[in-house]
Image (cartoon, grey):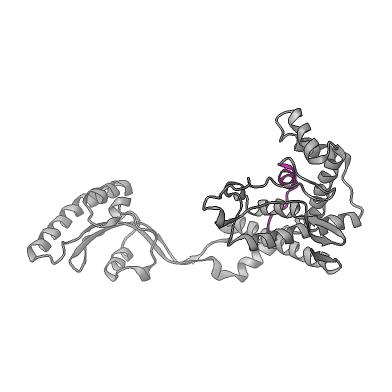
C-alpha cells in the first residue's frame, strides 16, 4: 500500500473512459482491451483487464465491483493500456494489491462519513472545475457525463466528493502526522553511522602499453620505449582532458575509449605497484612508468577521497525525504490495520 493517493489522479483514472457502468460509490470502469487484440508479447502472455460491474468484495455491506478493481490495476500498472493487459506472471500480485487498495479507500471513505467530515462548497467547486479541464470542449464533457453518469451532474459530484473526503482524511491522519523533525533526522544519522561511512577511493586515468602475447625480449624493449615516449607527453598534459586524449591515442587497454578514466576504486582493489604510486601523489600529478609484469602504465591522479563519514549537511535533504516517506507509509499501514479491526470485509 505504498501508492501515493491523489484526488486528481483518482478522478482522472476513474473517469477517463466512456461507456462504463458506475455505482454511486464506485470508480468508473477503465477502458477494456479490444477483444482479440494481442499484447506486445502475444495474447497468451497477458491477462486482459476487463470489467462488467460484477461485485468482487463487500466492505461493511458496500459492494465494490471489478470496475473498481480494473481502475486500480491500471493505477498500479499503467503500461497495461499499451500491452492490452497485465503480464501473466505479475497479474495475481497486481490484482491482490489492487483489491487491498480499493478496500482501503472504501474504509477511509466510510471513516470520513462516520466522522461527519464535509467538503466545503468552494473546495468542491475547484475540484469540479479542475476535472472539467481534462475535456477539450463542452460537448466532449457532455458526452462523457451522459455515457458514464447517466447525464447526472449529481452522480459525478458524489464521485468527486468521495475522492475529496478520502483525500481529507488521509491528509489528517497520514500527511499531517508524517512530518520529520530535525531531532529525528539527527537521531537517525547518529544511530546509523555505518550507513554514512565513505570508503577511501582513488579516481584516476591511465595510459597503458601492453605487449603482444608471448612477447619477445625485443618486443618488450620496444614496449618500454613506447611508454617512455608516452610519459614525456603525459607529463606535459595540463588537464585531465589533455591526458585523456593521449590515452585515447596511445593506450592499448579498453579504457582508452573513455579517455583512460577509471571509476573510483578502493585501495584493496589496486595492484600494489599502482597503490604505492598513488599514495605518493597529489591530485593532478602524473606518475612515472609503473611496470606490471611486461606491461607499462602511466597514471594521472584526479581525486583521492579519504575514508570518513558523509556530513549530515550533505545528506540532510535526502534523509529527511526518505524518513518522511517511511513514516508516511507506516502511518498508512497503521490506519489500514485500525480500520480493518472493526470492519467486515467479504470477498465475493
Q: Is residue 263 above or below residue 16?
A: below
**Location of residue 59 in the rendering, given as x and y in whole percent from the top left corner:** 83, 61
Res. 181 in view: no
Which quadrant holds the N terminus? bottom right
The magenta region covers 1-16
Q: Is residue 298 above or below residue 35?
A: below
- Which residue is at 85% across, 66% downward? 344
Looking at the image, which is closer to me, 65 or 317? Answer: 65
Quadrant in the picture for residue 222: bottom left
- Which residue is at 43% across, 64% downward? 306
- Which residue is at 80% across, 56% downward? 64
Which quadrant holds the C terminus? bottom right
Quadrant in the picture for residue 90: bottom right
**Location of residue 215 in the rendering, given as x and y in whole percent from the top left corner:** 12, 65
**Location of residue 282 in the rendering, given as x and y in whole percent from the top left corner:** 34, 58
Quadrant in the picture for residue 188: bottom right
Q: Is residue 155 above or below residue 228?
A: above
Instruction: Look at the image and say whether residue 6 sits in the magenta stretch.
Output: yes
- Which residue is at 73% across, 44% downward? 8
Query: In the image, 281: left or right of 214?
Result: right
Res. 207 in view: yes
Instruction: Look at the image and say whether residue 272 sits in the magenta stretch.
Output: no
**Location of residue 185 in the rendering, given as x and y in whole percent from the top left corner:** 66, 62
Amino acid at each position: 500500500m505504498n501508492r501515493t493517493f491523489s484526488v486528481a489522479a483518482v478522478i482522472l483514472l476513474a473517469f477517463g473512459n466512456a461507456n462504463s457502468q458506475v455505482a454511486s460509490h464506485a470508480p468508473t470502469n477503465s477502458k477494456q482491451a479490444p477483444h482479440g487484440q494481442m499484447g506486445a508479447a502475444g495474447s497468451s502472455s497477458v491477462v486482459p483487464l476487463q470489467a462488467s460491474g460484477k461485485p468482487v468484495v463487500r466492505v461493511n455491506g458496500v459492494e465494490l465491483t471489478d470496475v473498481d478493481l480494473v481502475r486500480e490495476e491500471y493505477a498500479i500498472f499503467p503500461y497495461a493500456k499499451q500491452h492490452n493487459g497485465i503480464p501473466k506472471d505479475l497479474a495475481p500480485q497486481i490484482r491482490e494489491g489492487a483489491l487491498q487498495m480499493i478496500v482501503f479507500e472504501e474504509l477511509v471513505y466510510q471513516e470520513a462519513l462516520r466522522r461527519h467530515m464535509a467538503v466545503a462548497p468552494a473546495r468542491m467547486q475547484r475540484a469540479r472545475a479542475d476535472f472539467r479541464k481534462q475535456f477539450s470542449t463542452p460537448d466532449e464533457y457532455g458526452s462523457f457525463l451522459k455515457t458514464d453518469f447517466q447525464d447526472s451532474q449529481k452522480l459525478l459530484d458524489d464521485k468527486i466528493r468521495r475522492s475529496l473526503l478520502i483525500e481529507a482524511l488521509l491528509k489528517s491522519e497520514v500527511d499531517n502526522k508524517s512530518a520529520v523533525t530535525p531531532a529525528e533526522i539527527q537521531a537517525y544519522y547518529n544511530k546509523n553511522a555505518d550507513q554514512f561511512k565513505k570508503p577511501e577511493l582513488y579516481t584516476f586515468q591511465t595510459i597503458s602499453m601492453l605487449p603482444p602475447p608471448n612477447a619477445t625480449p625485443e618486443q618488450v624493449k620496444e614496449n618500454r620505449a613506447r611508454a617512455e615516449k608516452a610519459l614525456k607527453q603525459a607529463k606535459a598534459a595540463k588537464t585531465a582532458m589533455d591526458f585523456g586524449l593521449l590515452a585515447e591515442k596511445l593506450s592499448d587497454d579498453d579504457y582508452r575509449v573513455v579517455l583512460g578514466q577509471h571509476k573510483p576504486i578502493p585501495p584493496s582493489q589496486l595492484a600494489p605497484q599502482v597503490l604505492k604510486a598513488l599514495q605518493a601523489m597529489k591530485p593532478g600529478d602524473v606518475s612515472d612508468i609503473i611496470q606490471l609484469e611486461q606491461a607499462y602504465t602511466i597514471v594521472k591522479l584526479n581525486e583521492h577521497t579519504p575514508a570518513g563519514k558523509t556530513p549530515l549537511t550533505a545528506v540532510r535533504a535526502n534523509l529527511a525525504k526518505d524518513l518522511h516517506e517511511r513514516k508516511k507509509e507506516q502511518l498508512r499501514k497503521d490506519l489500514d490495520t485500525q480500520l480493518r479491526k472493526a470492519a467486515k470485509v467479504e470477498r465475493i
